[in-house]
Image (cartoon, rainbow, N blue to C red):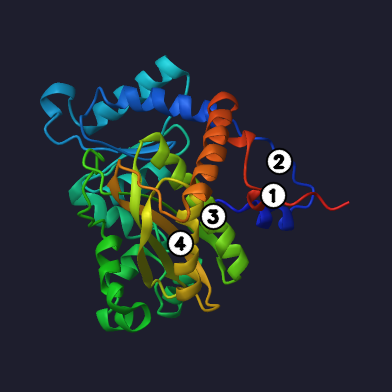
Amino acid sequence: MRAALSTHVARARCPQLILIEPRHDRYSEASDEVMLLLDAWSPLIEQVSVDEAYLDLAGTQQLHGDAAQVAQGLKRAVRKETGLTISVGGGASKLVAKIASGASKPDGLLIVPAEEQAAWLAPQPVGVIPGIGPVAQSTLRELGVSTCGELAAAPDDHLLRRFGPHGPSLKLLAIGQDDSPVDTGDDRKSLGREVTLDEDVADPHALETLLLDLVESVAHSLRKEELLARTVTLKLKDTEFVSITRQVKLPQPSALSGPIFEAARALLRAAAQGEPYRLIGVSASDFTSDEQLGLFDGKRTAREQAITAAADELRAKFGDGVIRRARLLPPEDEP
């Protein structure tokens, strides 16, 4: 399970790479169709990406049967209605369900009973745990840890010394313990995006470009949900697995990329001093639906609103890839 390569890295590794323009509008349509089908099996759904969601099946056994029966029914329904295949993983926690789904790809089904999850995880490499990337894996290998079973048995003081306060909690993940609930988003407190990088990035310009791409996505989602954010939060994770968060209030509530990016970039420049990072994220919160333009930047904001509205209209008609900021375009092929 690895994060996708950036276009820049992919081109560097494969100069002959042929890029096919993505059809984001069709992906979104198919995603909506699948999520609508999932809704028939549980009222508690957390969609985490265009092609991934969690379902809480507690209390649905009398109606739909056990987890395996639900998984089989889901696969049949999605295949019949959309022609798509899906992989389904089940477990007593979101963590185990995600790993099981990944292990069963493609078009797979794997249910891990709660009493078997520790034994099932034990021989698997620590890299199957979301968030334990190449750098953390290298650090763990230095401690003689390469499997989940070895991580579960590792001394707390060793993990504390190498990973800080978060270290010992890795042992809980190694046996499948994860108490995070399925978040339906009904009472949304924040809206964010983050990306775990395939390779650690220290270059300030590259980090800002990644941040801009995330901000564009967050701002677009804010506008679709007709929300304005008062607060912007930056999230970074360094090579030692330590998370850094910084937060700032916007001068005025906004759903525009410009002011959100300016705020997030200022946080990034203050927090990042040339160190490499393996994760970067941004979120917007403290929502309102009332907009009050500042006295001195009202014209500037109104101009960006007009440009953004035109861009959103183009995306709605022709797909997300029809218009992008120049900074986010992939580099041209070398002659």
When asked about the image quadrant of residue 186, the answer is top left
Query: Which sits earlier in the primary sequence, circle 4 or circle 2?
Result: 2
SS at badge 1: loop
Query: Which sits earlier in the primary sequence, circle 1 or circle 2?
Result: 2
Q: Count every numbered label the image shows and give the total.
A: 4
Residue found 40% across the figure and 26% down from its top: 32
Residue pushed farthest front? Answer: 295
Query: Which sits earlier in the primary sequence, circle 1 or circle 3?
Result: 3
Q: CA distance from mark 1 to mark 2?
A: 10 Å
Query: Is 102 drawn above or below residue 62 in the view shown?
Result: below
Q: Residues within 10 Å of mark 2 (few under 14, many from 20)?
A: few
Looking at numbered disc 4 in the image, what kind of residue is underneath it? Ala
Looking at numbered disc 2 in the image, what kind of residue is underneath it? Leu
> Is residue 295 or residue 265 the one in the foreground?
295
SS at badge 3: helix
Looking at numbered disc 1 in the image, what kind of residue is underneath it? Pro
Q: CA distance from mark 3 to mark 2?
A: 22 Å
Q: Which residue is mark 2?
A: 19
Q: Which callout, 1 or 4, points to the residue nearer the camera?
A: 4
Residue 189 shows up from this direction: yes
Query: Is 230 drawn above or below residue 318 in the view shown?
Result: below
Q: Residue 135 location in percent, x, y? A: 49, 71
Q: Residues within 10 Å of mark 4 (few under 14, many from 20)?
A: many
When asked about the image quadrant of residue 55, the answer is top left
Q: Residue 115 location in percent, x, y? A: 18, 50
Q: Which residue is mark 3?
A: 212
